[in-house]
Amino acid sequence: MNSRDRILARVRTAVADAREAPEPSRDYLASHTPDDPGAMVDLLHENLADYRAIVHRTDDDELPMLLMRLLAERGSATVLVPPALPPYWLRAADLVRIHDRAVLTPAELDEVDSVVTGCALAIAETGTIVLDGGPDQGRRRITLVPDHHICVVRVPDQVVASVPQAMARLDPTRPLTWISGPSATSDIELDRVEGVHGPRTLEVVLVSE
């Protein structure tokens, strides 16, 4: 008998007479936010900003001009686009478009100035954007390597109040990426460093339909 077998045998002996675990309670609230689409969008905006994301609000007609302005202010000459990004989003932006392809190397992705994507949904109570690798979002790596990410959220359709509500709408078999603000970490002295494992700058555009 090896060490692993001895440890497992002791665990089995210790729990042999234990009662079965009770069924988990599911009587908690699924949301702490009023069932008001406007209030949920306002809360999402507030929490995104609290996480140091830069938040913009516009409508569908003004979206192309806003994206053009944000890319110009960033000084971007290249933009990475997922395969099914709506063409009109970038119709006003005059810059080189790099399409998401499997052959792109990490070095090539690192040279891209900006990436523009859609999202699967957004969670108001946590200020979280969720990507699932959909056609308007592309592969996970395109939102992790470039330094500047603009993410478009359609409101209120893509906004839910809470994580439990989000889980009910997401497909767990897809490659889910949960984003709460720009990439950041802190050392033992709590010195914040941004851009360690993702973009230093996250801009979220809330588009009213």
Image (cartoon, helix red, strand yellow):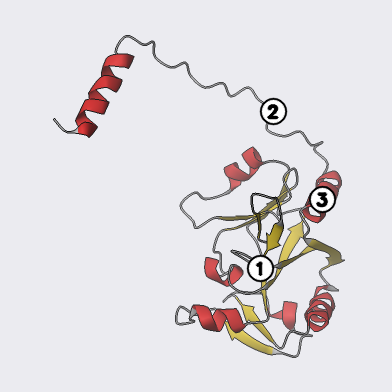
Distance of label 1 from label 3 (alpha carbons): 24 Å
> Which residue is disc 2 drawn over?
29
Looking at numbered disc 1 in the image, what kind of residue is underneath it?
Pro
On the image, the x and y values in percent for residue 79 come to 67, 82
Residue reaching furthest to the front: 189
Distance of label 2 from label 1 (alpha carbons): 34 Å
Q: Quadrant of the N terminus?
A: top left
Residue 207 seen in this snapshot:
no
Above/below status of 26 relative to 81: above
Residue 41 has which mark?
3
Looking at numbered disc 3 in the image, what kind of residue is underneath it?
Val
Q: Residue at x 73, y 54 (%)?
A: 157
Above/below status of 132 relative to 146: above
Of callouts 1 and 3, the N-terminal one: 3
Q: Nearer the viewer, mark 2 or mark 1?
A: 1
Secondary structure beneath label 3:
helix
Distance of label 3 from label 2 (alpha carbons): 20 Å
**Dot 1 alpha-carbon crowd within 10 angstroms: few under 14, some 14 to 19, many 20 or more:** many
> Which residue is disc 1 drawn over?
199
Residue 111 has which mark?
none
Secondary structure beneath label 2:
loop
**Dot 2 alpha-carbon crowd within 10 angstroms: few under 14, some 14 to 19, many 20 or more:** few
Residue reaching furthest to the left: 1
On the image, the x and y values in percent for residue 158 come to 70, 54
Looking at numbered disc 2 in the image, what kind of residue is underneath it?
Leu
Q: Residue at x 80, y 81 (%)?
A: 68
Of callouts 2 and 1, the N-terminal one: 2
Q: Quadrant of the C terminus?
A: bottom right
Of callouts 3 and 2, the N-terminal one: 2
